Structures are given as structure tokens and as C-alpha cells.
Amino acid sequence: MAPTPQTTPQLTPQFCFNQGVLQDFLRLSRATIDDSIIQNLNALITPSRTPFNPSSTSTRSTTPPPLKHPIDPPACASFKSRILFPSWQSRSNVLNYCAAVALNPDDPDLALAKAESAKERERVVDERLDPYSGRFFPREARTEVLGGVVRNERGVERIVRARTWGLVQERCGEASGEGWEEALDKWREAREKR
């Protein structure tokens, strides 16, 4: 049986700033759907309707068996609309929310980092006594760190979705040439009309 889509967690700034929780959600969602896409698609294949015939093993076939069994188109469409796209949308919602949080100019850490930076620049220390005192490594604000995490995770999403979509198209026998972005947009539009 195919897995159920991951639900979107309650979105709060604390969720985004806790990198471990954010990345664990994304990792678990990807592992459940995208990383196991072949197993999920294999689960959609209808088993053979004819029972096993033992005499089929007594002769050697010169034609190789088909490597990939095409999946029933309605089963593929159902998997995409009920499992795959909701999972992708859930991750998109989280990344979009966290990107908005990262752009928030009211972060208290940002003001603290600016004050710390100004204070460090004014400090005078004899470099003969402390040769490392001239180096100043300003601390990044939480929003800047979060922005970097979101950028990295969006890059990972693009790669994972392209790989997953290629396998879905191959196994479902679709040669439309439609990219995952277009397919996801169509799904979103159809969902909004309902």
C-alpha cells in the first residue's frame, strides 16, 4: 500500500528557527515519498491475473521479459494527486513560510549582531600581546542562517522532485514532456477550482 502524505506541521517562527526540526520534517517527508518512489510505484502494479504455470519453467525463453511493467494510468493519476503532489505542496508551504520568516527585519538577533559588530570594531588591543585580536568574526543573525538553510533545501527539493518526476513518467508510461513544475501547477489549479 502506498504511504499517506505527510501533513504540514504547525508553522511558527520557532519551527523554522529550529534547524533540526525543520530539516527532520523535510528529510522524513522525502524519505516517505521521494526516496522510496520505486517501491511506491511498484505497489501500484496489478498482480498477474493468471496463476503460476509450473511448465513455464521447463523451456527457456529467448525473448527477455519486459524490465518495467507499465502501471495502470488511473492508479498513476490517483497516486500523483493523492500522495505525491500533496507531499510536495506540504514541503513547499513549509519552505515558503520559513523564507518569509527569514525576511523578517524585526529579528532581535539582527540588532544584537549589529551592536556586537560595532563594539568589536571599536575595541583596541595591542596585537603584539594578542595576535588574534585583530580578527573579528561577526555572528550571523538567525534570519540570515535560516535564509541559507531555506535556499539549500529548495535546491535539494528541485533535484529530488526532478528525479522523482522522471521515474514517475517512466513507470507510468507518460511521454508528455511535461516537467514537474507544470504538473504541480496544474494540480494546484485543479485543487483550487474544487
Image: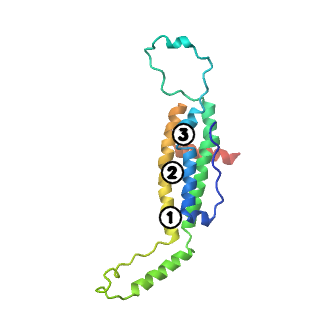
> Are the residues tagged 2 and 1 within 8 Å (C-beta)?
no
Q: CA distance from mark 2 to mark 1?
A: 15 Å
Q: Secondary structure at mark 3?
A: helix
Please provide percent x and percent y for residue 166.
49, 39
The quadrant holding residue 105 is bottom right
Observer-nearest of 41 and 88: 41
Mark 2 or mark 1: which comes first in sequence? 1
Q: Quadrant of the C terminus?
A: top right
Residue 171 drawn at (x, y percent): 52, 32
Secondary structure at badge 1 equals: helix
Picture layout, residue 133 above or below residue 153: below
* Residue occupying the point 60% across, 31% down: 73
Residue 21 locus on image (x, y percent): 57, 59
* Residue located at (64% from left, 56% from top): 9
Image disc number at residue 157: 2
Label at residue 168: none
* Type of the residue with mark 1: Gly
Q: Which residue is mark 3?
A: 37
Q: Position of 82 compared to 182: left or right?
A: right
Residue tagged by mark 1? 147
Q: Nearer the viewer, mark 3 or mark 2?
A: 3
Q: Nearer the viewer, mark 1 or mark 3?
A: 3
Q: Residue at x 43, y 14 (%)?
A: 62
Q: Residues within 10 Å of mark 3 (few under 14, many from 20)?
A: many
Q: Residue at x 54, y 10 (%)?
A: 55
Crowdedness near tag 2: few (<14), some (14–19) or many (≥20) residues, C-alpha within 10 Å? some
**Distance between the alpha carbons at the discs numbered 1 and 3:** 29 Å
Label 1 vs 3, first from the N-terminus: 3
